[in-house]
Image (cartoon, rainbow, N blue to C red):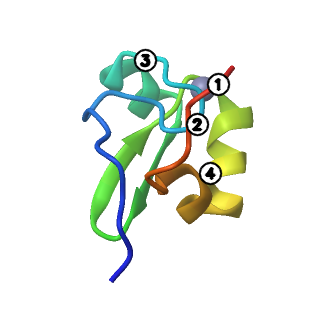
Amino acid sequence: MTEHRTIAPNEDPVCGMHPDPVAARDRGLVTTHEGREYVFCGKGCLLEFRDDPERFLAPGYTPAM
Ligand SMILES: [Zn+2]
């Protein structure tokens, strides 16, 4: 079982920002990983996360811009 750090429902796991989830969904800046929805501030973060989700969910990862 993979351990994940705690991420708020409206937290961008890549950079740590808190985008408006409604706006993020409107813009397609959401993705689902292991049954959970993650929101993103922009396409860059979304693509990075899709590339390697476990990297950003690892307990040792510190969100950075
Ligand atoms: Zn971001």
Mark 3 or mark 1, whichever is nearer to me: 1
- Dot 4 amino acid type: Phe
Q: Return the residue at label 2.
A: 14
- Dot 2 amino acid type: Val
Give the x, y percent position of residue 48: 71, 48
Residue lying at 58% horizontally and 36% vertically, measured from the top left: 14
Q: Closer to the N terminus: mark 3 or mark 2? A: 2
Whether the residue carrying mark 3 lies under 8 Å from ligand 1 is answered with yes
Residue 64's tag is 1
- Dot 1 amino acid type: Ala
In the visual, does 36 lie left or right of 50? left
What kind of element bears circle 1? loop
Residue lying at 31% horizontally and 28% vertically, measured from the top left: 10
Q: Return the residue at label 4.
A: 49
Q: Closer to the N terminus: mark 4 or mark 2? A: 2
Disc 3 packing (10 Å; few <14; some 14–19; many ≥20):
some
Q: Are discs 2 and 1 less than 8 Å apart at CB?
A: no
